[in-house]
Image: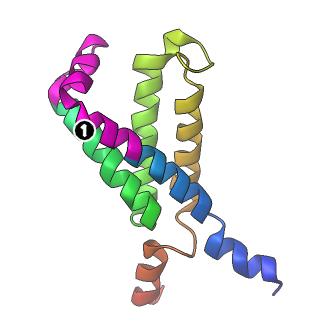
Amino acid sequence: MDRTSFVAPAWGMVPLRVVIGLVFLMHGSQKLLSLTSTAAFFDSIGIPIAQVAAALVTALEILGGVALILGWFTRVVAALLAIDMAVAILTARMDGGFFAPSGFEFELTLLGACLTLAVMGAGGFSLDAMQRQRRGQ
């Protein structure tokens, strides 16, 4: 076994997980600090039950960000965050074209990263891997 085949599975997903997790954690925290404004924005773009949706998205982004950083329930959390980004693109960013700041390129990048994590998992250096080892899988 060469060094690459040992290191890549253990560490390969760590930078992606940590960076994407940090982005979601920070954006969720920003929403939490202005939850009323977040709910008003959600209402203005037609999100039903905007106050509940704002609280759920905020919790998903904060808790999901932490979970990604730790590599805990990575596939499920990443899939939920991918849905979050798909909804953001379709409801809030599609009319702004592709390029930031009004377009959807940032959300699309997060969507792609989350889909990668949902398919590939957390990698070897994660709480998910530790739990698999404890169960003997």
Asked if residue 47 is among those painted magenta in the image, a careful observer would answer: yes
Residue 108 visible: yes
Report the magenta residues as a range: 26-51
Residue shown at the point (83%, 84%) measured from the top left = 2
Location of residue 30 (image quadrant): top left
Q: Residue 110, position in %: x, y?
A: 54, 40
Asked if residue 69 is among those painted magenta in the image, a careful observer would answer: no
Q: Residue 50, position in %: x, y?
A: 20, 23
Residue 80 visible: no
* Left or right of 17, for residue 45: left
Residue shown at the point (53%, 58%) measured from the top left = 17
Image quadrant where one finds the N terminus: bottom right
Residue shown at the point (52%, 47%) measured from the top left = 114
Image height of 46 relative to 56, above or below: above
Q: Main secondary structure of the magenta part?
A: helix
Q: Nearer the viewer, residue 15 or 121?
A: 15
Residue carrying label 1:
32
Dot 1 lies on which element? helix
Task: Give the amino acid type for the residue marked by disc 1 in the picture.
Answer: Leu
Image height of 65 relative to 122, above or below: above
Q: How is the image coloured?
A: rainbow
Q: Residue 51, position in %: x, y?
A: 16, 27
Image height of 3 relative to 92, above or below: below
Residue shown at the point (39%, 39%) measured from the top left = 27
Location of residue 29 (image quadrant): top left
Q: Residue 99, position in %: x, y?
A: 63, 19
